[in-house]
Amino acid sequence: MSAPVLPRTELEARQQLSALYRLCHLYGWTDLTSTHISTRIPGRDDAYLMNAHDELFDEITASSLCEIGFDGQMRTPGRVLNQAGHEIHSAVLKARPEVNFVLHSHTRAGVAVSAMPQGLLPISQHSGFVLGSLATHPFQDSTAVADEGAALAADLGANYTMLLQNHGLLAVGRTAAEVFMYHYHLEASCKIQADVLGAVQNPILIPDAALDPLLAWGAPENGPHGGHVWPALLRRLEREQPGYDQ
């Protein structure tokens, strides 16, 4: 596996984060301006980077990302704070010092599976990648419930993916590549499950013995994941979304 690509400067962090936003656009993971991805600022512990609430993901560039204080203050003049995003991302980044990126989405398939009482099932290879590090969290409005961010972070625990019930998906990563890989496999698992359960009532489940190698494949201790695919994803962005890193 290729070595993980960790941002060393704020500019590198901005470029990697803007790449994630553009990839979300290309893969259809957006919900107007309502979802969010964040990253730490290298060498800083007072603020992080995230999108404002007034840009579509295909408009975001490295320079348009906002600096937001862990105290909730928007430090980029003239921009609109996504308060729900701040509550979620600041809490997770505080609780997980080894994590550098947090991605939250409201994809159609993700919301659908998050509302299923059985949660994510071992139906596909993709699900095996995330099931060993998957948490759940009950629905609450993060802007209306006190300490919702802290409750979400507590339910996430040491896991790298989460089903937010009736709400969507959350993934974290030590690198941009890793958070992309965890979200990619979680979203693909949800799409497959929604398709299968829409067609049959009793799907074939992967047996435990066959599932174990898949769980090991996606285990956080065997990462950071995604280093081999990240350069190819950046090449796709250079072809299809030029200027994202400016």
Image (tube, grey):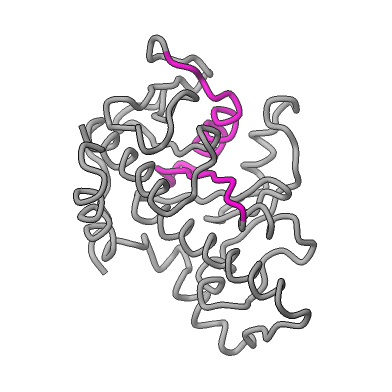
Q: Is residue 101 magenta?
A: yes
Q: x, y (%) of residue 122?
A: 63, 76
Q: Residue at x 59, y 89 (%)?
A: 209
Q: Quadrant of the C terminus?
A: top left
Vertical order, 144 against 119 (above or below): above
Q: x, y (%) of residue 161?
A: 56, 56
Q: Quadrant of the N terminus?
A: bottom left
- Residue 70 as seen in the image, left or right of residue 9: right
Residue projecting furthest to the top: 77
Vertical order, 7 against 183 (above or below): above
Q: Residue at x 41, y 14 (%)?
A: 75
Q: x, y (%) of residue 238?
A: 19, 48
Q: Quadrant of residue 139?
A: top right
| Magenta-highlighted residues | 79-108
Q: Is residue 189 magenta?
A: no
Q: Quadrant of residue 9?
A: top left
- Residue 190 as seen in the image, left or right of residue 46: right
Vertical order, 37 against 135 (above or below): above
Q: How many marks?
A: 0
Q: Residue at x 29, y 32 (%)?
A: 61
Q: x, y (%) of residue 68?
A: 44, 21
